[in-house]
Image: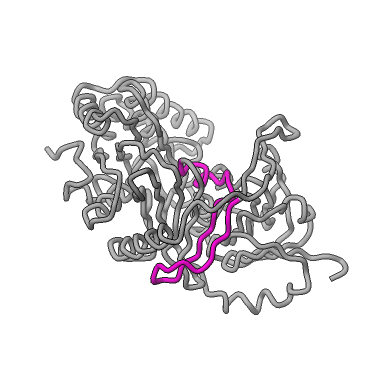
Amino acid sequence: MPRLVVPLSAPEAADPSRFGAKAANLAALGQAGLPVAGGCAVDAQAYRIQLAALGLEETARAVFSSGDRPQARRHALDMKLGLMERPLGPELTEPLLAAWRAVTDSGVQGVVRSSALVEDRADSSFAGQFESFLGLQSEAEFLTAVRACWAALWSTRALRYMATHGLDAADTAMALIVQPLVAARVSGGGLSRTAEGVGVINAARGLGSAIAQGEVAPDRYVLDLAGNPKESTPGRKYHGMGCAHGRAALSRSLAGRRCLDDEQIAELGLMMRKAEEVIGVPVEIEWAMDETGIKLLQARPLHVGETPAETQLRDEIWLAHPRLNGQASGIGWGTGRARVVNCECELERVAPGDVLVTTVAGPALGQVLTHVVGVVAELGGSTSHLASLARERGVPMVLGVLDATRRIPDGAMVAVDGVAGVVRWATESA
């Protein structure tokens, strides 16, 4: 029987059919000499063994096969509760704990990340749809995180995504990545090439989850395809406040200092070029920099949009209207009526054909990508999870747009250029 847990440095870890594309790509990057955090990959077979031990295989099949929506939701809940609440058998506990101890033997905190077999593929990125757990300190926390990652395959958000891609959760499985936590001073993401023929890097101080979740307006660095820095725009800091519905909201403060110097930007540019060679297509990466240097955390295929020349003609009729600039998701151009939403409580106001204008561009907004014609957000960058989902669907998106919810009138006609990073809205005087 193949080993259920293997080091990422092992040749077999680069097999996406066993360990998922996320783990396989990370293993391939490390084996090509690129800096990664190390750690282990857990075969998806471990998930299947647990499912069989819990007697949940028939319940799994019933989730998508049931024509009764309430019954399907009950089956999905049974899957989540079963995987979360019931313990692992010794045939799984022992190899998993051995991996945990190997990763944390020097006293560092641990990380458990999803690597579903359907994740990080060219046609289904699942960006932000599953779970990652950082800063784990004990064996009990680790085993809980393992069960939670498995259960995330049956979350409402993931099941909704699968339904729109013609996938059934019962036909796939969840592999895992177990790594030491990178104590990041700066972290972010990168696009190896865009429709404009450049590379883009996002960066913010601390762990990278804030960028991935679209909760900050990160630094943006533009590079030529040789990896040389061309221009930079510092990010903006936001602080918390309450929305009208009692939910958390954010308020803008001033821009801070650059997170990266030119040498670090150039180093990331070279890493992206090498990652392209390894994966074989343009890539989107996630990275973190601690006191020892930069480490790659992930690389997935990148959807590249049409060139700016192809959108220029459509933009000409809007040139007389006010504009705002931001960070382009890298794909799409569209027009629709603005629906200004200040928190998730108001998402029900967003109708098919609208352009969503909001503050935070988090993965929870992925549900609206099925019917909006564009998204404009005050926070987030080109490498956020929602930007990845928007590229996948061809939905134009512009992020990090200063004061978008204040400047763009609710109900106004809006043009969103997801390649150039420009938003315009119609006015009576124009």
Q: Quadrant of the C terminus?
A: bottom right
Give me the residue at 66% from left, 35% from top: 240
Q: Position of residue 365 (x, y in %)?
A: 58, 45
Q: Position of residue 407 (x, y in %)?
A: 77, 55
Q: Give left or right: position of 27 versus 366.
A: left
Outermost residue on the right side: it is 429
Give me the residue at 31% from left, 20% from top: 87
Give me the residue at 40% from left, 33% from top: 133
The correct choice, above or below, for 334 with respect to 144 in the image is: below
Numbered range of the magenta stretch = 207-235
Outermost residue on the left side: it is 1
Residue 249 is one of the magenta-drawn residues: no
Q: Nearer the viewer, residue 34 or 80?
A: 34
Residue 232 is one of the magenta-drawn residues: yes
Is residue 103 visible in this depiction of the protein?
Answer: yes
Q: Give left or right: position of 202 versus 62.
A: right
Q: Position of residue 335 (x, y in %)?
A: 68, 65
Q: Position of residue 231 (x, y in %)?
A: 53, 66
Q: Quadrant of the N terminus?
A: top left
Q: Nearer the viewer, residue 94 or 191?
A: 191
Give me the residue at 36% from left, 54% from top: 299
The correct choice, above or below, for 204 with respect to 141 in the image is: below
Find residue 76 and report its image quarter: top left
Q: Give left or right: position of 351 versus 157.
A: right
